[in-house]
Amino acid sequence: MITDRLARALDDRLRLSPIARRALAKVFPDHWSFMLGEIALYSFIALILTGVYLTFFFDASSADRVYRGGYAPLDGATVSAAYASTVRLSWDVRAGLLIRQTHHWAALVFVAAILLHLIRIFFTGAFRRPRELNWLIGVTMLTLALANGFTGYSMPDDLLSGLGLRIITSVVESVPLVGTWLVALGLGGEFPSDEMIPRLFVTHVLLVPAALVALLSLHLGILVRQKHSQFPGPGRTEHNVVGSRLWPSYTLRTLALFAWVLAVLFALGGLVQINPVWLYGPFEPAQSTSPAQPDWYVAWGDGALRLFPPWEIRVFGHLVPAPFVPGVLLGGVTFLALYAWPFLERRRTRDRRAHQLLDRPRDHPVRLAVGVAALTFYGTLVVAAGDDILARLLRVPVYDLLGVFRVLVLVLPVVAGLVAYLAARALRRGDAASLGDLTRADLRRAGQREPGPTGAEDEPELPARDRPGERIELWPEGDLWRWRYRDARQRVVLTGNRALRSEAEAVEASRLAYPGVDRVLVPGPPPAPPPGPLRVALRRWGRAAAAASLLVAALLQRRRDRRGDEPRGGDVGPPPREPGEAGPPSEPADESTTEGGRT
C-alpha cells in the first residue's frame, strides 16, 4: 500500500507512467546471441560491487610497509603498502580472497563478453545504418575495458604486474616526440615512481569506470530509442520486431541470467585460483619472472613484441624504436579500422538504407573473410605470447618455436580468410544448409566469378502487396482490438502482443509492422467451449469442500476462544465459603482508578 501511494505520488509529479508503459512494452528478439551484451553488463555490475569492497582494504601507496599477517613466508618483510594490503586482503580479511578473485574473473568475463558481442555485431552487419553510433560506442567501451583491466592488473605491485607495467612503459616511451612526456604524465615521473600506484588507482576506480557508465547509459538509451535488430525469419521484416515484451517475460529471463552470471563468477572466485600474488613476491625492478604471461586480453600485444624483429628506423631524424610497430602501431591501426569499418563498407556497397534485419555471415563473403583473418591473426599472437611455456612442454628451443610463429602469423590469416571466403560463396550460391553439406560442385561454383551487381541494393524495399496471399486480420475483444499476420500459406505467423483501445490504433500498429498488407475484419478466435458435466461437478464439489473447510475452521476457532476464557488447570481459586462465613479482607482500591473503572 505504501509502495502504491509512493508510485502514485511520483507519477502525479513527474508523469512517468506513459514513459514506463512504452518502455515495458518494448519487444526483444528471442535469440541467445543477444544475451552477450547483457553478460557484459552484469559482469560490469559484479566488478563495481566487488571493487567497492576491495577499496575498503587496499592501500594505493608505494611507501614501505612491514607486512604482519597470516602469510608466514612474508611475515616481517618490508614491502610496498599496495603489495602488503593485497596480501592482507588475500589472507587476513574475511572473504577478501573470494572477492578479489571474483573481481579478477569478472574483469576477464567482461572483456570477453564485449569482444564476443562486437564479433556478433560485425558478422551479422548490425553496425549498419542506423546503428553506426552504437558501434562506435561499443568499440570505445572495448578500449576502455582493456585499459581498466590493465590498470587493475598493475596495482598490486607484485613481481608479475610490475614486469607488465615496465613493458607497457617501454612501449609508450617508443612513441616518437611525445612518448617520454606521456609516461611522465601517467606515472608522475620516470618508472618506477612514487606516484605510479596512486595514479593507477585513480584511473582504475574513478576515471575509466565513470566513462564506462556514461557510455553504457548512452548505449542503452540508443537501444531503447531505436528498434532492436533481429535475424530473418517467418513474419520478420524491416518494420517490426518479433520476440518477447520487456515485462514480464524478458525481465524474468534477464534476471535469471543476472543470477547465473553472479553465481558463475563467485564460483570461479571461490574454486579457481587466479593471480596468487603472494607466490610472485613484491616487485623489484632488477628482477623478472619466467614464464610470465599477462591476462589473455593483452596477450596479443606480448605476442607481437616477441615476434617482431628488433628493427629500429629513423624518420625525419627521429629514432623509432623497435617496440613502436608491434606495441603502438599495430593496435592503433586495428582500432582505427574498427572505428572506420561501417563507413568503409557503406562506401563500398553503396548501401545507405536503414536495416533492422541482420545478415547471415555467408551473405557477405568479403566481410566474413576479413573478420576470420583478423581473428586468426590475433589468435596466433595470443598463442605466441606463451612461446616459452610451449618450448618447455614440447622440449624444443624457444628460438626455433619463435621462427615457426613468425611464419604462421603471416600465413594462417591469409589461408583462413580465403577458406572462409570460398565457403561463404559456396553456401550462398548452393543449396547446402551448413558447412557439412557442401559438395565439390558447390566449391567449384564458389571459385567462379559471380555476375555483376544489378543495383538492387540501391532500390527501396518493395511493399508487401506485391506478395499475394498475405493479410492482416483484426478483431474486437471486448472493448479492445487485436491483430495478427497470416502468410501466403494462411498460417498465423505473428499475433500482436498488445491489445489496443480502438480499431484505428490496431490498424496503425499492423501497418507499422507490415506496410502494404491487406487488412480484413474477422470474428476473432472462437469462444471457449462450455465446460462439461464432469468439470461442473468438480467445481461444485470444490466450492462445497472449501465452504465446509471454512465452517470447520470457524467452529474450531470459536472452541479455542471458549477454552481461553475458562481458568487453566494450574490456577486454583479460593475454596467455597459456608453460609454466614466472613470472607477475606478486601484490598484497598487503586488510587489511579475511579468508581466507574475510568482512569
Image (spheres, helix red, strand yellow):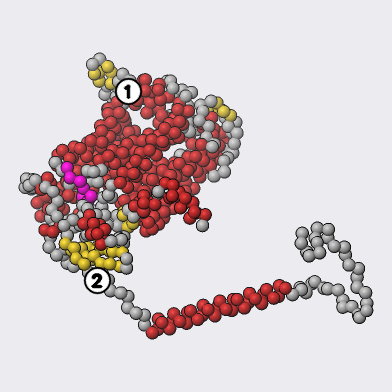
Q: Is residue 279 magenta?
A: no
Left or right placement of residue 419 versus residue 394 in this view: left
Mark 1: amino acid:
Ser
Q: Is residue 274 visible?
A: no
Residue 586, given in percent of the width and then of the height, sits at 89, 67
The front one of 144 and 475 is 475
The front one of 573 and 233 is 573
**Label 2 environment density (alpha carbons within 10 Å; few <14, some 14–19, many ≥20):** few
Residue 406 is labelled as: none
Residue under the image location 12 percent in, 45 percent down: 458
Mark 2: amino acid:
Pro
What is the magenta segment's predominant secondary structure? Answer: loop
Q: Which residue is mark 2?
A: 523
Residue 480, given in percent of the width and then of the height, sits at 31, 64
| Secondary element type, mark 2 | loop
Q: Which residue is mark 1?
A: 174
Image quadrant in which the C terminus is located: bottom right
Residue under the image location 57 percent in, 28 percent down: 65
User: In the picture, residue 583 is in which quadrant?
Assistant: bottom right
As drawn, which residue projects farthest toward the right?
A: 581
